[in-house]
């Protein structure tokens, strides 16, 4: 899952529990929501299941090479992204463009 960005003060403790229980691999964007989530997750989970990306292209590349056969990659930031993108449409368009480029190159 590609997650994170600027904090909207949503309740994330239960989400953190789900991530850890299900061992969901997260690619985390920079931002205050990401920092807060990382403060909740346990250190062992962070070491094994978290990678950081500073651009959508980087996030898509990490996901593409980190995913195993049968995995799904989900863009679900759960946070605002005005620190990286013009708006949610720009974020989605950049994700689609990055994924299509990876598929084409395969």
Image (cartoon, rainbow, N blue to C red):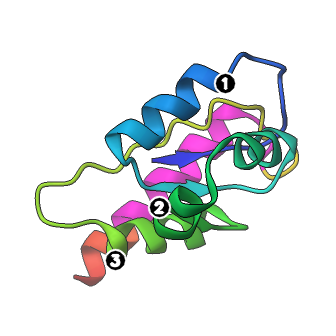
Residue 45 against residue 9 in the figure, above or below:
below
Between discs 3 and 1, the one toward the N terminus: 1
SS assignment at label 1: loop
SS assignment at label 2: helix
Residue 86 falls in image quadrant: top right
Residue 30 falls in image quadrant: bottom right
- On the image, the x and y values in percent for residue 62 come to 46, 72
Question: Residue at label 3?
Answer: 65
Residue 98 falls within the magenta-colored stretch:
yes
Judged by its main secondary structure, the magenta piece is helix
Residue 62 against residue 37 in the figure, above or below:
below
Q: Between residues 94 and 61, which one lies in front from this camera angle?
A: 61
Tag 1: Cα neighbours inside 10 Å, few (<14), some, or many (≥20)? some
- Disc number at residue 12? 1
- On the image, the x and y values in percent for residue 48 come to 47, 68
Count the labels in the image: 3
- On the image, the x and y values in percent for residue 12 come to 66, 24
Between discs 2 and 1, the one toward the N terminus: 1
Q: CA distance from mark 3 to mark 1?
A: 27 Å
Between discs 2 and 3, the one toward the N terminus: 2
Residue 87 falls within the magenta-colored stretch:
yes
Q: Which residues are magenta?
A: 85-100
Question: Residue at label 2?
Answer: 49
- On the image, the x and y values in percent for residue 45 come to 51, 57
Specify whether 82 is left or right of 62: right
Say if mark 3 contacts mark 1, CB within 8 Å. no
Residue 103 against residue 92 in the figure, above or below:
below
Tag 2: Cα neighbours inside 10 Å, few (<14), some, or many (≥20)? some
Specify whether 2 is left or right of 91: left
Residue 77 falls in image quadrant: top right
Q: CA distance from mark 2 to mark 1?
A: 17 Å
- Nearer the observer: mark 2 or 3; the answer is 2
């Amino acid at each position: 899952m590609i997650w994170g960005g600027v904090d909207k003060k949503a309740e994330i403790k239960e989400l953190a529990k789900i991530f850890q229980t299900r061992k969901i691999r997260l690619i985390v964007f920079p931002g205050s929501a990401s920092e807060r989530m990382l403060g909740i997750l346990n250190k062992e989970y962070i070491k094994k299941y978290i990678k950081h990306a500073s651009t959508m292209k980087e996030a898509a590349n990490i996901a593409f090479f980190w995913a195993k056969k049968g995995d799904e990659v989900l863009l679900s930031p759960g946070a605002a992204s005005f620190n990286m993108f013009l708006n949610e449409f720009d974020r989605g368009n950049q994700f689609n463009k990055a994924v299509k480029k990876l598929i084409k190159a395969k």
